[in-house]
Image (cartoon, grey):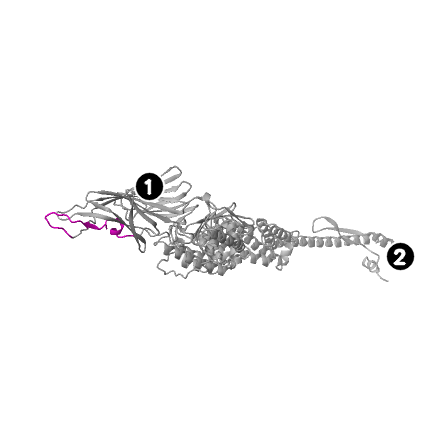
Amino acid sequence: MVPPPPAARPRIPKSRRIASGLAAGLVAVTLIGTIGARPALGADLLRLAVTTTYRVDVAEAAVHVTMDVTATSLKANSATRRFWYDTLSFGVQAEARAVEATSDGKRLRVTTAPRSHHLDVVVHTPNLYYRQTHKTRITFDLPGGKPRSPSPIRVGRAYASFTAWSWGDPGLANVRIVLPTSFAGDVTKWPDDRSDPLFARSKDGQQTYSADGIEEPDGWYATVDVADRAALTDTPLELGREDVAIHAWPEDREWLDRVSTVLESGVPSLEAAIGLPWPVPGQLGVSEVSSSQIEGYGGLYDSTHDEIQISEDLDSHVIVHEAAHAWFNTGLFAQRWINEGLADEYASRVPAGLAGSSLDDPQAVSIRDVAAFRLNAWPPPSRVDDTTEATESFGYDASWTVIRAIVDDAGMDGMRAVFAAVADHTATYPGIGPAETSGLAVTDWRRFLDLVEDVGGSTRAAGLIGTWAVTDTERPQLAARADARKRYDSLLAAGGTWLPGSVVRAPMRAWRFPEAAAAMTEAATVLADRDRLTTATAELGLAFPAALEPAYESAADEADLQALDGRIAGWIRAATAVRSARDALAAARAPLVAVGLLGTRPEAAYTAALAAFAAGDDAAAVAGSSEAVAALAGAEEIGRGRALSIGAVAAAVAVLLLVLVVLWFRARRRRRQALAGATAGLDTGPASLAMVAADDDAPTVATAVTPDGAPEPYATLAATPDPREEHEIGVEPD
């Protein structure tokens, strides 16, 4: 997926690398009258001090290399033999060209032989005898390869990249790297320890990096990745509201054309697919680099400086992938695998016809692969080498595999809703009213999972993330989440239109599941009591108290829920009291109850109780209902007392009437007797009788006491003329 880094210095056999493979020659020396004949080798007795200078030549697009070799022979002659060296042999970079050598101003014969990873260079020198020192200058060029060529060397007006080697004996090897001062970047030696530091200085428009007395020249090398940004092209890209500028190497018109074409089509397609507007507030720069500049990757998005760096390789997928990072970066999602997987997936969904793409689908991977790891543990990008290449490849392919499955499950519309919620910081587990904000600057894998399930509608995300992403220490969180969400779903079902308050939703959102469980237990108690109250009010035909639902939905802690449950208990008591009053008023009443209720109105207290219930005053509803019930409960005793009082009065009236009747009869008898005495000597003819009768017509009135004790006419007794009366008063019939 990403190109390998520039090759490190290959290991070269010592006999070829440090010139101790010089042939040891033999000359005829007469010592004892005979001529000695066999040559011998002086492999470890040649001292080499080498100062190597690498000079970047932008005009010639090459690195000029000069090796100043000081060779001293330490191979002593024997009694019969004399030894000398007549060649120097080095293994240099395989790309070396125009190899030449001189000594004392004279050109020396040079032969070369290519090997798999280097070039053998043999310099034929004048004979070097014991304790003699020769100086030899070897020069060659490292020509810059054209863009996308196999050569790891690049030298242009805007960029230079190569690897510097060292030669010589330990402590006698020195390196100089000379660059124009307009170039800036990394000049790094390897191994990167402090034993052989690089020192930089600038003079006369040049900057020189030096390493002296290199102790382990065998494995020492330095990588040079420098650029002159001012020399890059500056080509604006017409994308409407998106401000994009392409910065290419001046020598690479093909890259400029390809990147421009791909972005002109890819960026609008990405914007439509993602559903979020172009997120870069200023100008986005897209610069051409070597893969070594970006640690061996195909591209890199720098959200801090709003810059995309894309390698010289013409890979449309990589170009769109990096453009997608304008949205998918650590400003949106915290985990690397989410951003990389989304960038790969959405790069693969741009319209067809972007030729040159090497990736359309992730490579097949398994969680059991040797290089496999949990994606939440994927470290930040680092230099890609033999150790990290397998890990990085697995990380990219596994991330893409997971994200593709989630996007397929949620659908493009669902993912657009997810991205909108992330951008707006919309809280998961929403409550009543306007959408709340999460308060989180960046969405991590937990919030991502909540959003793709609750907003995007994915049903596979939890399983995928559990299989590929979570570490062993994070796995219990997924199990706790599954249990908590079951309880939460049950709470939502039980609540109906009543949505939980932040006392439940906030810990669910933050994955504080023990806290959420305790809150849901209290909330479930509230809902159970609410249902009791709902049944009671429905049976009574009363409106459910309107203030209770908002109180439930705004509960911020368990104390709020407990207080609400107490309020509901009070309303249940009020409903119970109203029911008791209703039932008591509707019951059949005994006569004594009716007598006891004379002058009272328990129905009025009940009506007041109903009005108080409707007005939200449960205490007044209880009081009114209790008053009605109390009135009904005491009516019989009051009626009994009243009945006894009325009986006593009636008895008294009856006795009085009896007394009056007796008195009346006695009075009448006396009048008759008086009349009889008055008329005993009178003429009893008709005239006299008429007078007596007329006198007797005067009415006689009796009074009585009313039940209330006020005197009023009780009965009128009047004497009227009647033949029978005449008989009764003593007139004998004829």
Looking at the rendered image, the disc whose residue lies closer to the viewer, 2 or 1, is 1
Where is the C terminus found, in terms of image quarters? bottom right
Q: In this image, 195 relative to 728: left or right?
A: left
Residue that carries the numbered disc 1 in the rendered image: 210
Give the tally of numbered discs.
2
Please state which of residues 559 and 732 is positioned toward the viewer in this rendering.
Answer: 559
Q: Residue 659: say if magenta.
A: no
Res. 374 image quadrant: bottom left
Main SS of the magenta part reads loop
Q: Visible in this render: residue 529?
A: no
Judge the density around disc 2: few (<14), some (14-19), many (≥20) Cα neighbours within 10 Å: few
Q: Which mark is residue 686?
A: 2
Query: Helix, strand or loop at disc 1?
Result: strand
Mark sitting on residue 497: none
Report the span colored magenta. Answer: 11-37
Choose between 401 and 517: the one closer to the eye.
401
> How far across and down, in percent of the image, does residue 226 sit?
40, 45
For residue 668, what is the image quadrant?
bottom right
The type of residue carrying mark 2 is Pro
N-term mark: 2 or 1: 1
Residue drawn at (69%, 55%) of the image: 654
Tell me the quarter of the picture where residue 275 sits. bottom right
Q: Crowdedness of circle 1 by 10 Å Cα count: few (<14), some, many (20+)?
A: some
> Which residue lies at the image location 35% right of the left edge and 41% below the top edge?
209
Q: Which amino acid does label 1 sit on?
A: Ser
Q: Is residue 609 left or right of residue 700?
A: left
Q: Where is residue 616 in the image (x, y as percent from the top left)?
A: 59, 50
Magenta region includes residue 22: yes
Nearer the observer, 167 or 570: 167
